[in-house]
Amino acid sequence: MKLFQKLLALGLLIVSIIFICTFYIHHQDQKRIENITRLLEKSAQIEKTFASNQQGLSAASQEEKKLYDKIISYQVDNNQEIRESVQAVLNSIEKQQQYLEESKQNFSEAYHTLSTIQPFIQKVRDPKQVKATSSMVQLNEQRYQLYLDYAKDYAAAIALNKELYQQIGKEQFNEQELDQQVEKINRLYQKLHKKKDQFNRYTSQFNQKKEQYYRLAKLI
């Protein structure tokens, strides 16, 4: 009878240990999910500000395009109108420069925030969650590197545009030089358009992986 009681007590102890270990592991898993989710959401909030600045950048760029069309529609001797429009377009370029700098800061902050999920991923036990979160980190890196290239090219386009309009305002140009400058700017804008499309593709893939992770973590 005593042996039976001892075996029963031992069995209950083992069950208790297993229960405690299982509870602890589950608790740690939940903490990791909460930490990863918190960082994903924090990064997403920062990207909302980034998106807002990108919209401002696009609006300022459209404003510049309209003013450029207005300038080239003037007769050559409309000096006063040309100078006024050039000043307006230079103001628009300054806006673009400001929006671009703010966008770079926003996206850099969002990127570094999301990058900090890496230590949590290493401790995730579910291989499907590991794959989804690792893919997010990889796509985050690709988006960041591509955006840095995009911002660099955009800054170069801004510099060329500023130089172009300053020359027009001072009437210090000839048609051949003007055409060459415009052609150079257009080539840059073609590169920017391609990079923007690729960035959007990466973003779409990133959001798909994020949604997949939420489903795996039973958050949606």
Image (cartoon, rainbow, N blue to C red):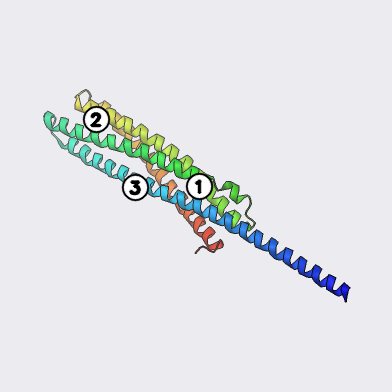
Residue at the outermost bottom position? 1
- Count of picture labels: 3
Q: Are marks 1 and 2 in contact (CB under 8 Å)?
A: no
Q: Are marks 1 and 3 in contact (CB under 8 Å)?
A: no
Q: Which picture quadrant has residue 175?
A: top left
Q: Are marks 2 and 3 in contact (CB under 8 Å)?
A: no
Quick one: label 1 or label 3, which is nearer the N terminus? 3
Residue at 19% across, 27% down? 169
Residue 31 place in picture, x, y as percent: 58, 56
Residue underneath mark 1: 114
Q: Quadrant of the N terminus?
A: bottom right
Q: Which picture quadrant has residue 148?
A: top left
Secondary structure of residue under mark 2: helix
Amino acid residing under circle 1: Leu
Residue underneath mark 2: 165
Q: Considering only vertical position in the picture, is 172 above or below 215?
A: above
Out of 43 and 69, give the one closest to the viewer.
Answer: 43
Quick one: label 1 or label 2, which is nearer the N terminus? 1
Residue at 24% across, 27% down? 166
Residue underneath mark 3: 52
Q: Considering only vertical position in the picture, is 87 above or below 204?
A: above
Amino acid residing under circle 3: Ser
Q: Is residue 128 left or right of residue 102?
A: right
Residue at 28% across, 27% down? 163
The residues bearing labels 2 and 3 have C-alpha atoms spaced at a distance of 27 Å
What is the crowding at mark 2: few (fewer than 14 residues within 10 Å), some, or many (at least 20)? many
